[in-house]
Image (cartoon, rainbow, N blue to C red):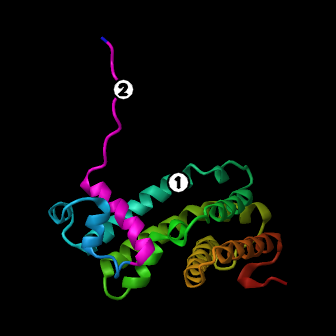
């Protein structure tokens, strides 16, 4: 009996709406993106929308979790995990982030970072979902940052968790500047500054309490 190859499964309405949310919200912002926009982009009816999501806010929360799943898989498979030296892995992560900065602004900026700027006061459930995504990603850097400090006999000012969050603060801030200017080079420059800063920290034998002398 000859078997025919299985056709790839077509995305259902829920998956189409999540993909549209990532695309449109990064382009237009959360507030400016309507349910009608999402349905039109996804090619689904409003009935299908409300079958899967109670409201636009409900979709936003789901989209933040969907974003985390997609980006977690992307970063987990990235080559920066390969070097033996944990500092090389940290610096490789930043090089990888720099390589991702290509195309239009909406293609390389952060979905959850965009949403939380719109709704941090008005929609606490969305804010919390964005928090979990951004802070959860930062946590993936902590072990390598701490290991690199231990290997070099230094104490990181504020600890590895603080440094990991600082990397995200630089990236998110750089995305804002890129949106304001339309210039992706600002993001690359900011990452280069961050790389130099981290190299300086790990080269200094006395960094406890922020003393860089």
Image coordinates of residue 161 in percent, x first then y, are 58, 72
Q: Quadrant of residue 31?
A: bottom left
Image coordinates of residue 101 in percent, x first then y, are 62, 66
Frontmost residue, 184 versus 98 = 184
Q: Residue at x 21, y 65 (%)?
A: 53
Residue 8 visible in the displayed image: yes
Q: Is residue 84 above or below residue 87?
A: above
Residue 17 visible in the displayed image: no
Q: Secondary structure at mark 2?
A: loop
Q: Is residue 45 left or right of residue 200?
A: left
Image coordinates of residue 205 in percent, x first then y, are 83, 73
Residue that carries the numbered disc 2 in the rendered image: 5
Res 126 label: none
Q: Is 80 a magenta residue?
A: no
Q: Is residue 63 above or below residue 114?
A: above
Q: Residue at x 55, y 55 (%)?
A: 75
Residue that carries the numbered disc 1 in the rendered image: 74
Q: Secondary structure at mark 1?
A: helix
Q: Residue at x 34, y 34 (%)?
A: 7
Image coordinates of residue 72 in percent, x first then y, are 49, 57
Marks 2/1: CA–CA distance: 27 Å
Number of labels in the image equals: 2
Frontmost residue, 210 versus 77 = 77
Q: Is 5 a magenta residue?
A: yes
Q: What segment carries the magenta color?
A: 2-29
N-terminal-most mark, 2 or 1: 2
Q: Is residue 151 left or right of residue 10?
A: right
Label 2, residues with CA under 10 Å away: few <14, some 14-19, many ≥20: few
Q: Quadrant of residue 42?
A: bottom left
Q: Is residue 194 left or right of residue 133?
A: right
Locate the N terminus by quadrant. Answer: top left
Label 1, residues with CA under 10 Å away: few <14, some 14-19, many ≥20: few
């Amino acid at each position: 009996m000859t078997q025919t190859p299985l056709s790839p499964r077509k995305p259902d309405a829920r998956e189409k709406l999540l993909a549209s949310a990532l695309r449109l919200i990064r382009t237009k912002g959360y507030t400016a993106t309507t349910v009608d926009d999402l349905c039109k982009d996804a090619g689904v009816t409003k009935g299908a929308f409300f079958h899967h999501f109670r409201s636009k806010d409900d979709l936003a929360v789901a989209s933040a979790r969907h974003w985390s799943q997609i980006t977690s898989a992307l970063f987990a498979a990235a080559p920066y995990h390969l070097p033996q030296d944990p500092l090389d892995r940290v610096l490789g992560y930043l090089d990888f982030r720099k390589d991702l900065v290509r195309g239009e602004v909406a293609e390389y900026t952060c979905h959850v970072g965009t949403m939380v700027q719109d709704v941090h006061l008005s929609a606490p459930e969305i804010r919390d979902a964005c928090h979990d995504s951004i802070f959860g990603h930062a946590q993936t850097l902590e072990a390598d940052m701490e290991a690199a400090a231990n290997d070099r006999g230094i104490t990181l000012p504020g600890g590895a968790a603080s440094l990991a969050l600082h990397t995200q603060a630089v990236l998110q801030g750089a995305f804002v500047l890129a949106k304001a200017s339309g210039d992706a080079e600002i993001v690359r420059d900011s990452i280069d500054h961050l790389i130099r800063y981290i190299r300086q920290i790990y080269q200094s034998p006395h960094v406890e309490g922020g003393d860089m002398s």
